[in-house]
Each structure stands twice: as C-alpha cells, then as structure tokens.
Image (spheres, rainbow, N blue to C red):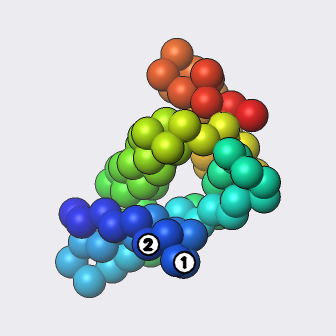
C-alpha cells in the first residue's frame, strides 16, 4: 500500500491494487487541522487502510505542531481508541 499526502488537495491518499482510500481535512484556523472525512473503496475495507491513513495524518499533524479536530466519526473513534498516543493533539 502506498500513502501520499497532497497538501494542495488537503487529502491523504492510499492506493493498493488499483483501489483507493482517502482522508480529507481542512485548516479552519491557524495551527488547527480538522480531519473531516474518511473513505475507503469497498475492496479495501477491513484491511487496515483507514487506520494507516489515520496514523499517517495524525503523525503529520504532530510533526507540524498542529492541534487536531475530528469532525470525521472514524477519526474521532480512532483517536479515542488510541487515546494515550493522540489525546494531546486534540484542539
């Protein structure tokens, strides 16, 4: 699986065997990123694609010293599930 961040699209893309997943975000204010939507093609669901997208996006936010909002229900659950690692990033 290949994951690529496209800042101009405000999206992280995952590709595997011709199928895609994506995690889109917005920058509602300085120093804040809001992860808004996660989508994974049916053929890739249940294979950890959304989890990999979430990890990469949150690691990027941490490296950029951004505070995180999770409008996306998947991202909210992911951060809650991995509370110890990501709670400090929440805005």
- Report helix, strand or loop for mark 2: strand
Along the line of sight, the residue nearer the viewer: 48 or 34: 34
Q: Is residue 10 left or right of residue 67?
A: left
Residue 39 place in picture, x, y as percent: 54, 68
Q: Is residue 51 left or right of residue 8?
A: left
Look at 22% across and 63% down and name the residue there.
Answer: 1
Residue 81 place in picture, x, y as percent: 56, 27
Q: Is residue 32 visible?
A: yes
State how many labels appear.
2
Q: CA distance from mark 2 to mark 1?
A: 5 Å
Residue 26 place in picture, x, y as percent: 69, 63
Look at 24% across and 66% down and name the residue there.
Answer: 2
Residue 24 place in picture, x, y as percent: 59, 66
Q: Is residue 75 above or below residue 39?
A: above
Quadrant where the C terminus lies?
top right
The residue most toward the top is 84
Crowd band around label 1 with a 10 angstrom C-alpha radius: few (<14), some (14–19), many (20+): few
- Report helix, strand or loop for mark 1: helix
- Label 2 close to label 1 by CB (< 8 Å): yes
Q: Is residue 33 above or below residue 59?
A: below
**Residue 27 marker:** none
Give the residue at mark 1: 9
**Residue 6 marker:** 2
Look at 70% across and 47% down and name the residue there.
Answer: 32
Kindly indicate the quadrant of the structure image that contains residue 49: bottom left
Q: Is residue 21 above or below residue 33?
A: below
The residue most toward the bottom is 18
Look at 45% across and 65% down and name the residue there.
Answer: 12
């Amino acid at each position: 699986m290949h994951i690529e961040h496209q800042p101009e699209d405000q999206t992280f893309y995952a590709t595997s065997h011709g199928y895609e997943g994506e995690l889109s975000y917005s920058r509602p204010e300085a120093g804040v990123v809001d992860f808004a939507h996660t989508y994974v093609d049916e053929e890739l669901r249940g294979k950890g694609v959304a989890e990999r997208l979430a990890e990469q996006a949150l690691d990027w936010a941490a490296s950029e010293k951004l505070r995180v909002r999770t409008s996306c229900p998947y991202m909210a659950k992911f951060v809650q599930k991995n509370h110890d690692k990501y709670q400090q990033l929440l805005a």
